[in-house]
Amino acid sequence: MEGILIRYATQFFAVESITLHFPK
């Protein structure tokens, strides 16, 4: 269960950083 949460959080932060660097 923890692995899934960590994986989800990692993807979420990755998307956040990408959005900040490349705003639509």
Image (cartoon, grey):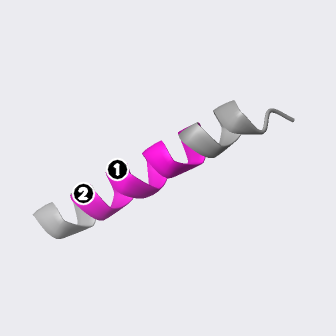
Quarter in which the N terminus is drawn: bottom left
Q: Please, what secondary structure does the residue beneath circle 2 have?
A: helix
Q: Which residue is mark 1?
A: 9
Q: Quadrant of residue 22?
A: top right
- Residue 18 is tagged as none
Give the main secondary structure of the magenta stretch: helix
Q: Are marks 1 and 2 in contact (CB under 8 Å)?
A: yes
In the image, farthest residue toward the front: 21
Q: CA distance from mark 1 to mark 2?
A: 6 Å
Q: Which residues are magenta?
A: 6-16
The amino acid beneath tag 2 is Leu
Viewer-proximal residue among 3 and 1? 3
The amino acid beneath tag 1 is Ala
Q: Please, what secondary structure does the residue beneath circle 1 have?
A: helix
Image position, residue 15 (x, y; %): 58, 48
**Lateral position of residue 5 relative to residue 18, left or right:** left
- Taking the magenta stretch, the answer to whether it contains residue 11 is yes
**Lateral position of residue 20 relative to residue 16, left or right:** right
Q: Can residue 11 be seen?
A: yes
Viewer-proximal residue among 23 and 9? 23
- Taking the magenta stretch, the answer to whether it contains residue 21 is no
Q: Quadrant of residue 23?
A: top right
- The residue depicted at 24 percent of the width and 57 percent of the height is 5
Quarter in which the C terminus is drawn: top right
- The residue depicted at 34 percent of the width and 50 percent of the height is 9
Image position, residue 12 (x, y; %): 47, 48
Q: Which residue is mark 2?
A: 5
- The residue depicted at 64 percent of the width and 45 percent of the height is 18
In the image, farthest residue toward the right: 24
> How would you rate the neighbour count of disc 2 (Cα within 10 Å): few for under 14, some for 14-19, many for 20 or more?
few
